[in-house]
Image: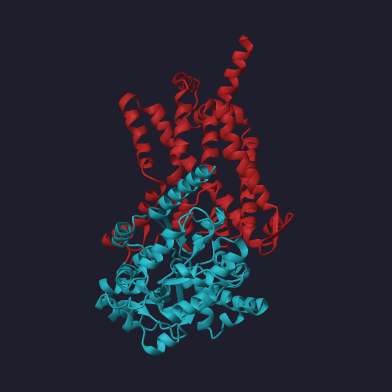
Chain colours: A red, B cyan
Amino acid sequence: MTTDGSKLGFYLLLAPILLWLVVLIILPHLGLFWVSISEKIGPREFQTGFGNYVTFFEEPLYWRTFARTAIMSILATALTLIFGFPIAYYIAKLTRGRTKTTLFLMCMIPFWVSELVRTFGWMILLRETGVFSNLLQYLGLVSGPVEFLYNDAAIMVGLVYTSILFMVVPLVTTLDSLDDSLIEAGYDLGGNSLSILREIVIPHAMPGIVSGCIVVFMLSLGNYLTPILLGGKDSLWFTGMIYTQFITRFNWELGSALGFLLLALSSGVVFLGLKLSRQSLADTMGRA
Amino acid sequence: MKIKVFSTVLVATALTAQITSADTLRLLTWGGYAPEEVIAKFEEETGHTVEVTTSNNEEMIAKLRATNGGGFDLAQPSQDRITSAQEEFGIYKPIDMSKVNADQFIPSMLMATATNTTYEGEIYGLPHVWGTSGLVVNTAEAGDVTDYTDLCDGSVAGKVSYRLKRPTLIGFAYSMGLDPFAAYGDTDKYQEILDQVEAKLTECKANVKTYWDGGDEIKNLLRSGEVVASMAWDTGGWQLNADNPDITFVAPESGALGWIDTFVLPARGRADDAAYDWINFVMRPDIAAMITNTAGNFTAAVGGDEGVSADLKARYQGSFDQAAVDNIKWYPPVPAGLETLEGATLDRINAAK
């Protein structure tokens, strides 16, 4: 009787997550996969086949955009790590009490407004008649208006800005758990800042670095607004391509196939990253 | 038994009566086509409530396709995009002409739209608002721009914007001396035209500041002076003209592209009566004038231009003389499948460096 009761409790507790997984994740993906393997042969006529996937490999446009998106996302992740690590280290190790809370809060405040508003903020700063351009002209550094918007650098700035919080938070958590005495012991044994960073801090922070990188990479790869709005005419991004297939081309079949390829790409890159950094997913997610 | 049948009928009629008397009309339309004061007046007169969703041609079709024609009771796509969408996805239902007050429509426009939206013998569309796309130019800085291909001229380098959508392909084709509408039925010939336009637009890409997406975006770019010449809708040009007399709509030498936005009934719409009430209501001359004054475009309503503000009429006449009106290229219905070719061309232009 008691076992039955506890079993019931177990299933009841399991039900929400199962429901969520099946209804919101697995079923839509099955549907999407079904759409992706139907080839259109005429109005309202379809046949089953992998033609849409073949299109992707045959048309250089698609896989070039695919590669570009992946490379830019990896670069954005690396830049976010480079900017995020010192911030996280400062917050976790060099501040105490109220200062720490305040700094942490300041990192979060920009995320209280929506991504769209933040991106428009960057557009106001970077556009030809915007703040930076006017400031440079006022200081006499340039003679005419300068356009900072609509290029890859603008996309990169937007991506790093959008995702830096998701790097800082796991890093602060892991760095917090590093005992200060270990760093002191490192100095006592004759290490310098660089070797201590390499031998003690980074190995300890590795799970945080990896989980931060996974989240930032996924966010950048799946970002739609930032590349489209800041990139202008050169803003080729894979998610934008999927949107176009679905909405403006009415080609759900190819759009679904591209969606699955994006899923495969992101999973592949994360797997590769875990292998290269010799971390396991369980370890990373458990500690960060 | 009789009483039971009678009571069932009674209940059924009561339910239907309730449904017909006060419905919620879910309207899928363009920005400006359903102004607040028009909705308020309609709700007061008929007792229906109106829920407005603003969208564009592609999104309207995509939304209705996702639900097999459900979720909305009345939609307003352009007349050239109806038969192909009906053929591919079956998302509309035919118009019941007996419920429409046909006298309120300008006969020639009603006829033309009916012909263009007839699929398998049934009429699917009624004309509502019409307008053109052409050039919106800051005449003080780019007075030489008189045709689409002039946007690729070195004198306006970096200060040009257009949409990366099918009207741009069509406009450039006409400007290059080609006739895309005549090639609608011939896929190979159309592809040939697309290839030429693709080469031109790829070459022209260096001139473009950015491809605009929404009406507010292009108005913003023109108003700030970051863009001095663009391909855009006539209303955008006239609205900007009110703020800055240098900026106005110019009908291109090769002809402005004329569109008509229609009324269509989504296949699984639930409030058809409210939809017909709305159609008959907004086609009344006084209401049509109210819509023209907010949307900036004229309607297919008889006498609808009488109540329009004098400013707007003056701007319209400034952009269109009789020759320019005669030269308007009206979009014929797009055959199913053509948009796939255009899509591939647009993707390649977008990816070109």
Q: Is residue B105 above or below residue A136?
A: below
Q: Is residue A83 found left or right of B306 in the rendered image?
A: right
Residue B198 visible to an observer of this rendering: yes
Residue positioned 54% across, 80% down in the render: B173
Residue positioned 44% across, 35% down in the render: A168
Q: Is residue B66 found left or right of A138 in the rendered image?
A: right
Q: Nearer the viewer, residue B183 or B76?
A: B76
Q: Quadrant of the N terminus of chain A?
A: top right
> Which residue sits furthest front?
B2
Q: Nearer the viewer, residue A282 or B183?
A: B183
Residue positioned 46% across, 52% down in the render: A225
Q: Nearer the viewer, residue A140 or B309?
A: B309
User: At which x and y percent is residue B182?
Assistant: 59, 83
Q: Is residue B175 above or below residue A51?
A: below
User: At which x and y percent is residue A176?
Assistant: 44, 25
User: At which x and y percent is residue A222?
Assistant: 53, 47
